[in-house]
Amino acid sequence: MPEALHPFGLVPAGTQPPRVTVSSSSFGSVKADVAVCFLFEGEKTPAANGLSAASALAKALGVVLRGEPMKGKRKELAVWPSAGRFPASRYVIAGLGRRGDLTPDRLREACGLAARRAALLRAKRLVVSMPPPGPHASAADLAHAATEGLALGSYRLTKYQTQDDGSAETLKSAELLVPRDAMKPTLSGAARGAISANATNLVRDLVNEPAMVVTPARMAEIAQKVAKESGCDIRVYERKDLERLGMRAILGVSAGSTQPPCLIHMIYKPRARSGRKALRRIALVGKGLTFDSGGLSLKTASGMETMKLDKAGATVVLAVMSVLKKLDLPLEVHGIMGMTENMPGGSALKPGDVLHTMSGRTIEVLNTDAEGRLVLADALEFAQQQKPDQIIDLATLTGACMVALGPSCSGILGTDQTLVDDLMAAAERAGEKMWQLPLYEDYRDLIRSDVADVKNSPSTRYGGAITAALFLKNFVTNGVPWVHLDIAGPAFFESEQGYMRKGATGAPVRTLIQYLESLAGPRTV
Protein backbone atom coordinates (compact mmCIF):
# COMPACT_ATOMS: atom_id res chain seq x y z
CA MET A 1 0.00 0.00 0.00
CA PRO A 2 1.51 3.42 -0.92
CA GLU A 3 2.25 5.80 1.94
CA ALA A 4 -0.35 8.47 2.64
CA LEU A 5 0.70 11.97 1.72
CA HIS A 6 0.06 15.42 3.07
CA PRO A 7 -1.66 17.80 0.63
CA PHE A 8 1.86 19.09 -0.06
CA GLY A 9 3.21 15.72 -1.18
CA LEU A 10 5.00 15.04 2.10
CA VAL A 11 5.13 11.62 3.74
CA PRO A 12 3.76 12.19 7.25
CA ALA A 13 5.59 10.96 10.32
CA GLY A 14 2.31 10.31 12.15
CA THR A 15 -1.18 9.09 11.46
CA GLN A 16 -3.53 11.13 9.35
CA PRO A 17 -6.57 12.71 11.08
CA PRO A 18 -10.01 11.14 10.62
CA ARG A 19 -12.31 12.53 7.95
CA VAL A 20 -15.09 14.36 9.81
CA THR A 21 -18.66 14.50 8.54
CA VAL A 22 -21.89 15.86 10.03
CA SER A 23 -25.36 14.34 10.14
CA SER A 24 -28.65 14.55 12.02
CA SER A 25 -28.93 10.78 12.56
CA SER A 26 -30.13 9.46 15.87
CA PHE A 27 -27.39 8.29 18.20
CA GLY A 28 -29.12 4.97 18.70
CA SER A 29 -29.28 4.13 14.98
CA VAL A 30 -25.73 4.74 13.70
CA LYS A 31 -23.24 1.94 13.12
CA ALA A 32 -19.70 2.54 14.30
CA ASP A 33 -16.77 0.91 16.02
CA VAL A 34 -17.11 3.46 18.82
CA ALA A 35 -20.02 5.81 19.59
CA VAL A 36 -19.40 8.70 21.99
CA CYS A 37 -21.91 10.62 24.09
CA PHE A 38 -21.41 13.00 27.00
CA LEU A 39 -22.47 13.23 30.63
CA PHE A 40 -22.70 16.53 32.47
CA GLU A 41 -21.71 16.60 36.12
CA GLY A 42 -24.70 16.30 38.44
CA GLU A 43 -26.90 14.65 35.79
CA LYS A 44 -27.86 10.99 35.68
CA THR A 45 -28.32 10.35 31.96
CA PRO A 46 -26.00 11.22 29.05
CA ALA A 47 -27.06 13.65 26.37
CA ALA A 48 -27.37 11.97 22.96
CA ASN A 49 -28.87 13.24 19.72
CA GLY A 50 -32.33 11.80 19.02
CA LEU A 51 -32.06 9.22 21.79
CA SER A 52 -35.30 8.70 23.68
CA ALA A 53 -35.00 8.15 27.41
CA ALA A 54 -37.36 5.19 26.99
CA SER A 55 -35.20 3.49 24.35
CA ALA A 56 -33.36 0.25 25.05
CA LEU A 57 -29.97 1.92 24.44
CA ALA A 58 -30.69 4.77 26.87
CA LYS A 59 -31.70 2.27 29.54
CA ALA A 60 -28.59 0.18 28.88
CA LEU A 61 -26.33 3.25 29.20
CA GLY A 62 -28.11 4.09 32.46
CA VAL A 63 -27.24 0.65 33.81
CA VAL A 64 -23.60 1.20 32.76
CA LEU A 65 -23.48 4.51 34.64
CA ARG A 66 -24.94 2.98 37.78
CA GLY A 67 -22.11 0.46 37.75
CA GLU A 68 -19.36 3.02 37.12
CA PRO A 69 -17.80 5.48 39.60
CA MET A 70 -18.47 8.22 37.07
CA LYS A 71 -19.92 11.61 38.00
CA GLY A 72 -19.62 13.46 34.68
CA LYS A 73 -16.45 15.29 35.69
CA ARG A 74 -13.87 16.35 33.15
CA LYS A 75 -11.50 13.63 31.91
CA GLU A 76 -13.80 10.79 33.04
CA LEU A 77 -14.48 8.04 30.49
CA ALA A 78 -16.61 4.91 30.68
CA VAL A 79 -16.39 2.30 27.91
CA TRP A 80 -19.10 -0.29 27.36
CA PRO A 81 -18.90 -3.10 24.74
CA SER A 82 -22.42 -3.69 23.43
CA ALA A 83 -21.78 -7.33 22.44
CA GLY A 84 -23.85 -6.91 19.29
CA ARG A 85 -27.01 -5.71 21.07
CA PHE A 86 -26.84 -2.25 19.48
CA PRO A 87 -25.49 -0.75 16.21
CA ALA A 88 -22.15 0.44 17.64
CA SER A 89 -19.59 -2.10 18.83
CA ARG A 90 -18.64 0.03 21.84
CA TYR A 91 -20.15 3.05 23.55
CA VAL A 92 -18.04 5.67 25.32
CA ILE A 93 -19.50 8.08 27.88
CA ALA A 94 -17.26 11.09 28.46
CA GLY A 95 -17.54 13.62 31.28
CA LEU A 96 -17.85 17.33 30.47
CA GLY A 97 -18.17 18.96 33.88
CA ARG A 98 -21.16 21.13 34.73
CA ARG A 99 -23.51 21.96 31.86
CA GLY A 100 -23.36 25.72 32.44
CA ASP A 101 -19.55 25.66 32.37
CA LEU A 102 -19.26 24.00 28.96
CA THR A 103 -16.62 25.65 26.77
CA PRO A 104 -15.14 24.59 23.41
CA ASP A 105 -11.91 23.65 25.17
CA ARG A 106 -13.72 21.21 27.48
CA LEU A 107 -15.27 19.50 24.47
CA ARG A 108 -11.90 19.52 22.65
CA GLU A 109 -10.37 17.77 25.63
CA ALA A 110 -13.18 15.20 25.94
CA CYS A 111 -13.12 14.40 22.20
CA GLY A 112 -9.34 14.11 22.29
CA LEU A 113 -9.48 11.63 25.17
CA ALA A 114 -12.26 9.66 23.46
CA ALA A 115 -10.26 9.55 20.22
CA ARG A 116 -7.20 8.29 22.10
CA ARG A 117 -9.28 5.53 23.67
CA ALA A 118 -10.81 4.68 20.30
CA ALA A 119 -7.33 4.40 18.78
CA LEU A 120 -6.31 2.00 21.55
CA LEU A 121 -9.41 -0.04 20.70
CA ARG A 122 -8.29 -0.04 17.03
CA ALA A 123 -11.47 1.67 15.96
CA LYS A 124 -11.71 2.91 12.38
CA ARG A 125 -15.11 4.62 12.52
CA LEU A 126 -16.34 6.80 15.38
CA VAL A 127 -19.51 8.82 15.91
CA VAL A 128 -19.93 11.67 18.40
CA SER A 129 -23.26 12.92 19.66
CA MET A 130 -22.59 16.62 20.06
CA PRO A 131 -23.69 18.37 23.28
CA PRO A 132 -26.09 21.29 22.90
CA PRO A 133 -24.66 24.83 22.69
CA GLY A 134 -24.47 26.87 25.88
CA PRO A 135 -23.77 30.40 27.06
CA HIS A 136 -20.02 29.97 26.48
CA ALA A 137 -20.10 27.79 23.37
CA SER A 138 -21.93 28.15 20.05
CA ALA A 139 -22.67 25.17 17.79
CA ALA A 140 -19.96 26.29 15.34
CA ASP A 141 -17.34 26.68 18.06
CA LEU A 142 -18.21 23.30 19.57
CA ALA A 143 -17.87 21.62 16.16
CA HIS A 144 -14.54 23.38 15.63
CA ALA A 145 -13.25 22.15 18.98
CA ALA A 146 -14.59 18.61 18.57
CA THR A 147 -12.93 18.24 15.17
CA GLU A 148 -9.62 19.47 16.56
CA GLY A 149 -9.86 17.13 19.55
CA LEU A 150 -10.54 14.09 17.37
CA ALA A 151 -7.59 14.86 15.09
CA LEU A 152 -5.15 15.74 17.87
CA GLY A 153 -6.13 12.89 20.18
CA SER A 154 -5.89 10.18 17.50
CA TYR A 155 -2.44 11.28 16.27
CA ARG A 156 0.34 8.73 16.70
CA LEU A 157 3.94 8.67 15.47
CA THR A 158 4.12 5.60 13.21
CA LYS A 159 6.49 6.27 10.32
CA TYR A 160 9.49 4.48 11.77
CA GLN A 161 7.71 1.51 13.35
CA THR A 162 8.24 -1.65 11.33
CA GLN A 163 6.59 -4.25 13.54
CA ASP A 164 2.99 -4.96 12.53
CA ASP A 165 1.35 -5.68 15.88
CA GLY A 166 -2.04 -4.31 14.84
CA SER A 167 -1.46 -0.97 16.52
CA ALA A 168 -1.03 0.66 13.12
CA GLU A 169 -4.82 0.67 12.72
CA THR A 170 -5.96 4.28 12.67
CA LEU A 171 -9.18 6.17 13.10
CA LYS A 172 -10.38 6.78 9.53
CA SER A 173 -13.65 8.66 9.94
CA ALA A 174 -15.73 10.47 12.53
CA GLU A 175 -19.33 11.67 12.30
CA LEU A 176 -20.75 14.51 14.39
CA LEU A 177 -24.44 14.04 15.25
CA VAL A 178 -26.53 17.19 15.76
CA PRO A 179 -30.18 18.24 15.46
CA ARG A 180 -31.17 19.23 11.93
CA ASP A 181 -31.34 22.95 12.77
CA ALA A 182 -27.70 22.88 13.92
CA MET A 183 -26.34 21.34 10.72
CA LYS A 184 -25.16 24.55 9.03
CA PRO A 185 -23.10 26.02 11.90
CA THR A 186 -21.74 22.58 12.73
CA LEU A 187 -20.55 22.06 9.16
CA SER A 188 -18.88 25.47 9.19
CA GLY A 189 -17.19 24.87 12.53
CA ALA A 190 -16.02 21.39 11.57
CA ALA A 191 -14.45 22.76 8.36
CA ARG A 192 -12.49 25.36 10.32
CA GLY A 193 -11.50 22.80 12.92
CA ALA A 194 -10.13 20.48 10.23
CA ILE A 195 -7.99 23.29 8.81
CA SER A 196 -6.38 24.17 12.15
CA ALA A 197 -6.01 20.52 13.20
CA ASN A 198 -4.29 19.58 9.95
CA ALA A 199 -1.91 22.54 10.35
CA THR A 200 -1.19 21.49 13.93
CA ASN A 201 -0.45 17.92 12.91
CA LEU A 202 1.80 19.15 10.09
CA VAL A 203 3.96 20.79 12.77
CA ARG A 204 3.91 17.59 14.83
CA ASP A 205 5.07 15.61 11.81
CA LEU A 206 7.93 17.99 10.99
CA VAL A 207 9.13 18.41 14.57
CA ASN A 208 8.95 14.67 15.24
CA GLU A 209 11.15 13.96 12.20
CA PRO A 210 14.79 13.27 13.13
CA ALA A 211 17.43 15.90 12.44
CA MET A 212 18.97 13.62 9.81
CA VAL A 213 15.72 13.92 7.81
CA VAL A 214 14.66 17.54 8.27
CA THR A 215 17.83 19.51 7.65
CA PRO A 216 17.79 23.24 6.82
CA ALA A 217 17.92 22.40 3.10
CA ARG A 218 15.11 19.86 3.43
CA MET A 219 13.02 22.39 5.32
CA ALA A 220 13.49 24.80 2.41
CA GLU A 221 12.32 22.13 -0.04
CA ILE A 222 9.25 21.47 2.06
CA ALA A 223 8.49 25.19 2.30
CA GLN A 224 8.68 25.47 -1.49
CA LYS A 225 6.11 22.68 -1.87
CA VAL A 226 3.86 24.28 0.73
CA ALA A 227 4.17 27.67 -0.96
CA LYS A 228 3.22 26.23 -4.35
CA GLU A 229 0.09 24.58 -2.96
CA SER A 230 -0.85 27.47 -0.70
CA GLY A 231 -0.60 30.41 -3.08
CA CYS A 232 2.43 31.96 -1.35
CA ASP A 233 5.46 33.59 -2.89
CA ILE A 234 8.74 32.25 -1.56
CA ARG A 235 12.43 32.99 -1.62
CA VAL A 236 15.12 30.93 0.05
CA TYR A 237 18.25 32.84 1.03
CA GLU A 238 21.23 30.49 0.97
CA ARG A 239 24.69 30.94 2.48
CA LYS A 240 25.97 33.34 -0.17
CA ASP A 241 22.81 35.43 0.22
CA LEU A 242 23.19 35.52 4.00
CA GLU A 243 26.77 36.70 3.56
CA ARG A 244 25.65 39.43 1.18
CA LEU A 245 22.92 40.56 3.59
CA GLY A 246 25.32 40.64 6.53
CA MET A 247 23.50 37.93 8.50
CA ARG A 248 26.62 36.94 10.41
CA ALA A 249 24.69 35.84 13.48
CA ILE A 250 22.96 33.00 11.59
CA LEU A 251 26.22 32.23 9.80
CA GLY A 252 28.05 32.14 13.13
CA VAL A 253 25.65 29.61 14.62
CA SER A 254 25.97 27.41 11.53
CA ALA A 255 29.77 27.54 11.38
CA GLY A 256 30.34 24.18 13.11
CA SER A 257 27.87 22.25 10.95
CA THR A 258 28.31 20.63 7.55
CA GLN A 259 24.64 21.44 6.82
CA PRO A 260 24.34 24.84 5.09
CA PRO A 261 22.02 27.40 6.72
CA CYS A 262 19.25 29.31 5.00
CA LEU A 263 16.56 31.88 5.65
CA ILE A 264 13.11 31.12 4.22
CA HIS A 265 10.77 34.00 3.36
CA MET A 266 7.17 33.17 2.41
CA ILE A 267 4.61 35.86 1.52
CA TYR A 268 0.85 35.45 1.44
CA LYS A 269 -1.34 38.17 -0.06
CA PRO A 270 -5.14 38.20 -0.50
CA ARG A 271 -6.24 36.82 -3.85
CA ALA A 272 -6.70 39.62 -6.36
CA ARG A 273 -9.88 38.09 -7.77
CA SER A 274 -11.54 38.33 -4.35
CA GLY A 275 -11.29 42.11 -4.51
CA ARG A 276 -10.12 42.17 -0.90
CA LYS A 277 -7.23 44.40 0.10
CA ALA A 278 -4.87 43.50 2.88
CA LEU A 279 -6.08 45.04 6.13
CA ARG A 280 -2.70 44.60 7.81
CA ARG A 281 0.80 43.33 7.15
CA ILE A 282 1.96 40.77 9.70
CA ALA A 283 5.41 39.23 10.08
CA LEU A 284 5.73 35.80 11.73
CA VAL A 285 9.32 34.92 12.61
CA GLY A 286 10.34 31.40 13.63
CA LYS A 287 13.49 29.93 15.12
CA GLY A 288 14.51 26.89 13.06
CA LEU A 289 17.31 24.93 14.70
CA THR A 290 16.96 21.53 13.05
CA PHE A 291 19.32 20.23 15.73
CA ASP A 292 20.93 21.95 18.70
CA SER A 293 23.91 20.23 20.27
CA GLY A 294 24.79 23.40 22.19
CA GLY A 295 27.85 23.96 19.99
CA LEU A 296 31.12 24.13 21.91
CA SER A 297 29.06 24.88 25.04
CA LEU A 298 27.96 21.28 24.64
CA LYS A 299 24.71 20.03 26.14
CA THR A 300 24.63 16.85 28.21
CA ALA A 301 23.82 13.60 26.41
CA SER A 302 20.30 13.54 27.88
CA GLY A 303 19.88 17.22 27.09
CA MET A 304 20.44 16.49 23.40
CA GLU A 305 18.00 13.61 23.10
CA THR A 306 15.03 15.77 22.10
CA MET A 307 16.84 18.61 20.37
CA LYS A 308 15.14 17.90 17.06
CA LEU A 309 12.37 19.95 18.72
CA ASP A 310 14.36 23.18 18.32
CA LYS A 311 12.84 23.74 14.87
CA ALA A 312 9.34 24.06 16.32
CA GLY A 313 9.05 27.84 15.94
CA ALA A 314 9.86 27.71 12.23
CA THR A 315 7.52 24.78 11.57
CA VAL A 316 4.67 26.64 13.29
CA VAL A 317 5.25 29.58 10.95
CA LEU A 318 5.25 27.23 7.96
CA ALA A 319 2.02 25.55 9.07
CA VAL A 320 0.22 28.88 9.55
CA MET A 321 1.33 30.02 6.10
CA SER A 322 -0.03 26.77 4.66
CA VAL A 323 -3.65 27.53 5.63
CA LEU A 324 -4.02 31.23 4.82
CA LYS A 325 -5.30 30.53 1.31
CA LYS A 326 -7.96 28.14 2.65
CA LEU A 327 -9.06 30.72 5.22
CA ASP A 328 -9.05 33.47 2.55
CA LEU A 329 -7.91 36.07 5.06
CA PRO A 330 -7.59 39.72 3.94
CA LEU A 331 -4.10 40.00 5.43
CA GLU A 332 -0.60 40.17 4.04
CA VAL A 333 1.48 37.73 6.05
CA HIS A 334 5.24 37.25 5.89
CA GLY A 335 6.58 33.95 7.22
CA ILE A 336 10.29 34.18 8.03
CA MET A 337 12.21 31.10 9.15
CA GLY A 338 15.89 31.12 10.15
CA MET A 339 17.18 27.59 9.57
CA THR A 340 20.46 26.08 10.73
CA GLU A 341 22.09 23.46 12.93
CA ASN A 342 24.20 24.25 16.00
CA MET A 343 27.11 21.82 16.09
CA PRO A 344 30.64 21.64 17.56
CA GLY A 345 33.60 21.44 15.22
CA GLY A 346 36.89 22.99 14.25
CA SER A 347 35.17 25.99 12.66
CA ALA A 348 32.45 26.34 15.30
CA LEU A 349 31.60 29.59 17.05
CA LYS A 350 33.66 29.99 20.23
CA PRO A 351 32.83 31.64 23.56
CA GLY A 352 34.24 35.15 23.44
CA ASP A 353 33.64 35.61 19.71
CA VAL A 354 31.91 38.80 18.54
CA LEU A 355 29.30 38.68 15.77
CA HIS A 356 28.19 41.52 13.50
CA THR A 357 24.47 41.23 12.76
CA MET A 358 22.38 42.35 9.80
CA SER A 359 21.28 45.41 11.80
CA GLY A 360 24.89 46.47 12.39
CA ARG A 361 24.71 45.75 16.10
CA THR A 362 27.32 43.48 17.62
CA ILE A 363 26.93 40.49 19.94
CA GLU A 364 29.48 39.01 22.31
CA VAL A 365 28.92 35.25 22.39
CA LEU A 366 29.61 33.85 25.84
CA ASN A 367 27.53 30.68 25.57
CA THR A 368 27.14 28.97 22.19
CA ASP A 369 24.08 27.14 23.54
CA ALA A 370 22.20 30.46 23.62
CA GLU A 371 22.08 30.31 19.83
CA GLY A 372 18.40 30.73 19.05
CA ARG A 373 18.47 34.40 19.97
CA LEU A 374 21.39 34.85 17.56
CA VAL A 375 19.39 33.41 14.68
CA LEU A 376 16.40 35.57 15.62
CA ALA A 377 18.56 38.71 15.80
CA ASP A 378 19.12 38.55 12.03
CA ALA A 379 15.62 37.24 11.26
CA LEU A 380 13.97 40.10 13.19
CA GLU A 381 15.99 42.70 11.31
CA PHE A 382 14.97 41.05 8.03
CA ALA A 383 11.34 41.12 9.20
CA GLN A 384 11.51 44.84 9.92
CA GLN A 385 12.71 45.49 6.39
CA GLN A 386 9.37 44.12 5.13
CA LYS A 387 7.71 47.10 6.88
CA PRO A 388 5.10 45.08 8.80
CA ASP A 389 2.43 46.52 11.06
CA GLN A 390 3.41 44.02 13.75
CA ILE A 391 5.95 41.26 14.36
CA ILE A 392 5.36 38.01 16.25
CA ASP A 393 8.32 35.71 16.83
CA LEU A 394 8.17 32.13 18.08
CA ALA A 395 11.02 30.15 19.55
CA THR A 396 11.80 27.21 21.79
CA LEU A 397 14.13 29.67 23.45
CA THR A 398 14.71 29.09 27.17
CA GLY A 399 14.47 26.37 29.77
CA ALA A 400 13.95 29.25 32.19
CA CYS A 401 10.47 29.80 30.74
CA MET A 402 9.62 26.18 31.51
CA VAL A 403 10.86 26.64 35.07
CA ALA A 404 8.63 29.70 35.45
CA LEU A 405 5.47 28.47 33.71
CA GLY A 406 5.69 24.70 33.54
CA PRO A 407 5.75 22.36 30.54
CA SER A 408 2.45 23.29 28.89
CA CYS A 409 2.40 27.11 28.97
CA SER A 410 4.02 29.57 26.54
CA GLY A 411 5.55 32.76 27.84
CA ILE A 412 4.54 35.95 26.07
CA LEU A 413 6.48 39.22 26.24
CA GLY A 414 6.22 42.28 24.05
CA THR A 415 6.28 46.01 23.46
CA ASP A 416 2.60 46.47 22.66
CA GLN A 417 0.05 45.54 25.34
CA THR A 418 -2.87 45.46 22.91
CA LEU A 419 -1.06 42.89 20.78
CA VAL A 420 -0.19 40.86 23.89
CA ASP A 421 -3.80 40.96 25.09
CA ASP A 422 -5.19 39.97 21.68
CA LEU A 423 -2.85 37.00 21.41
CA MET A 424 -3.70 35.84 24.92
CA ALA A 425 -7.40 36.07 24.08
CA ALA A 426 -6.78 33.99 20.96
CA ALA A 427 -4.89 31.43 23.06
CA GLU A 428 -7.86 31.19 25.42
CA ARG A 429 -10.20 30.50 22.50
CA ALA A 430 -7.78 27.96 21.05
CA GLY A 431 -7.37 26.09 24.33
CA GLU A 432 -3.63 26.78 24.52
CA LYS A 433 -2.00 28.08 27.69
CA MET A 434 -0.14 31.41 27.55
CA TRP A 435 1.00 33.79 30.28
CA GLN A 436 2.59 37.23 30.15
CA LEU A 437 6.02 37.86 31.61
CA PRO A 438 7.39 41.39 32.14
CA LEU A 439 10.10 43.18 30.18
CA TYR A 440 11.85 44.91 33.07
CA GLU A 441 14.19 47.49 31.54
CA ASP A 442 16.62 47.38 34.47
CA TYR A 443 17.32 43.72 33.59
CA ARG A 444 19.10 45.01 30.50
CA ASP A 445 22.18 45.46 32.66
CA LEU A 446 22.36 41.66 32.88
CA ILE A 447 23.08 41.37 29.15
CA ARG A 448 25.32 44.42 28.82
CA SER A 449 28.66 43.54 27.23
CA ASP A 450 32.06 45.04 27.93
CA VAL A 451 33.27 44.48 24.35
CA ALA A 452 30.13 44.56 22.15
CA ASP A 453 26.65 46.10 22.08
CA VAL A 454 25.10 43.15 23.91
CA LYS A 455 26.06 39.68 25.15
CA ASN A 456 24.03 36.58 24.44
CA SER A 457 24.25 35.08 27.93
CA PRO A 458 23.24 36.99 31.08
CA SER A 459 25.47 37.41 34.10
CA THR A 460 23.01 35.46 36.28
CA ARG A 461 20.89 32.35 35.88
CA TYR A 462 17.80 34.14 37.19
CA GLY A 463 15.10 35.63 34.95
CA GLY A 464 16.42 33.86 31.87
CA ALA A 465 13.19 34.09 29.84
CA ILE A 466 13.02 37.84 30.46
CA THR A 467 16.67 38.55 29.64
CA ALA A 468 16.35 36.48 26.45
CA ALA A 469 13.38 38.58 25.34
CA LEU A 470 15.23 41.78 26.24
CA PHE A 471 18.10 40.55 24.06
CA LEU A 472 15.68 40.19 21.14
CA LYS A 473 14.19 43.61 21.84
CA ASN A 474 17.58 45.11 20.95
CA PHE A 475 16.93 44.01 17.38
CA VAL A 476 13.40 45.45 17.02
CA THR A 477 14.24 49.10 16.68
CA ASN A 478 11.78 50.82 14.37
CA GLY A 479 8.90 51.07 16.82
CA VAL A 480 6.81 48.30 15.21
CA PRO A 481 4.63 46.43 17.75
CA TRP A 482 6.47 43.22 18.62
CA VAL A 483 5.66 40.14 20.67
CA HIS A 484 7.89 37.21 21.53
CA LEU A 485 6.44 33.78 22.28
CA ASP A 486 8.73 31.44 24.21
CA ILE A 487 7.29 28.02 23.39
CA ALA A 488 10.07 25.89 24.92
CA GLY A 489 7.58 24.06 27.16
CA PRO A 490 4.41 23.39 25.15
CA ALA A 491 6.08 22.73 21.78
CA PHE A 492 7.22 19.25 22.82
CA PHE A 493 5.96 17.02 25.64
CA GLU A 494 8.45 14.58 27.15
CA SER A 495 5.56 12.52 28.54
CA GLU A 496 1.88 12.12 27.71
CA GLN A 497 -0.36 14.97 28.88
CA GLY A 498 -4.10 14.55 28.57
CA TYR A 499 -5.01 13.76 24.99
CA MET A 500 -1.58 14.87 23.72
CA ARG A 501 0.94 12.09 23.25
CA LYS A 502 4.63 12.31 23.99
CA GLY A 503 6.45 14.35 21.35
CA ALA A 504 5.60 17.41 19.30
CA THR A 505 2.30 19.16 20.03
CA GLY A 506 2.00 21.81 17.30
CA ALA A 507 1.59 24.63 19.83
CA PRO A 508 0.74 27.46 19.23
CA VAL A 509 -0.58 27.00 15.67
CA ARG A 510 -4.20 27.16 16.80
CA THR A 511 -3.60 30.40 18.70
CA LEU A 512 -2.05 32.13 15.70
CA ILE A 513 -4.84 31.02 13.38
CA GLN A 514 -7.43 32.29 15.87
CA TYR A 515 -5.56 35.58 16.14
CA LEU A 516 -5.24 36.12 12.39
CA GLU A 517 -8.93 35.30 11.94
CA SER A 518 -9.80 37.91 14.58
CA LEU A 519 -7.91 40.55 12.58
CA ALA A 520 -9.76 39.59 9.42
CA GLY A 521 -13.24 40.21 10.80
CA PRO A 522 -16.19 37.88 10.00
CA ARG A 523 -15.28 34.27 9.36
CA THR A 524 -15.26 33.11 5.76
CA VAL A 525 -15.14 29.34 6.32
Image: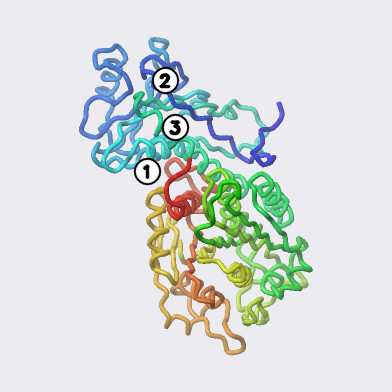
For label 3, the residue is: 187
In this image, 239 relative to 386: left or right? right
> Viewer-proximal residue, 66 or 49?
49
Q: Earlier in the sequence, mark 3 or mark 2?
A: 2
- Visible residue check, residue 374: no
Q: Position of residue 256 (x, y in %)?
A: 74, 68
Q: Is residue 473 above or below residue 3?
A: below
Residue furthest bottom in the image = 450
Q: Earlier in the sequence, mark 1 or mark 2?
A: 2
Q: Position of residue 334 (x, y in %)?
A: 59, 59
Q: Rounded to the nearest whole Å, what is the CA distance between mark 1 and mark 2?
A: 25 Å
Picture disc at residue 90? 2
Q: Position of residue 488 (x, y in %)?
A: 51, 59
Q: Position of residue 424 (x, y in %)?
A: 39, 58
Tell me which residue sits at (36%, 23%) in the image: 180
Q: Nearer the viewer, mark 1 or mark 2?
A: 1
Q: Rounded to the nearest whole Å, what is the CA distance between mark 3 and mark 2?
A: 25 Å
> Viewer-proximal residue, 73 or 508?
508
For label 1, the residue is: 105
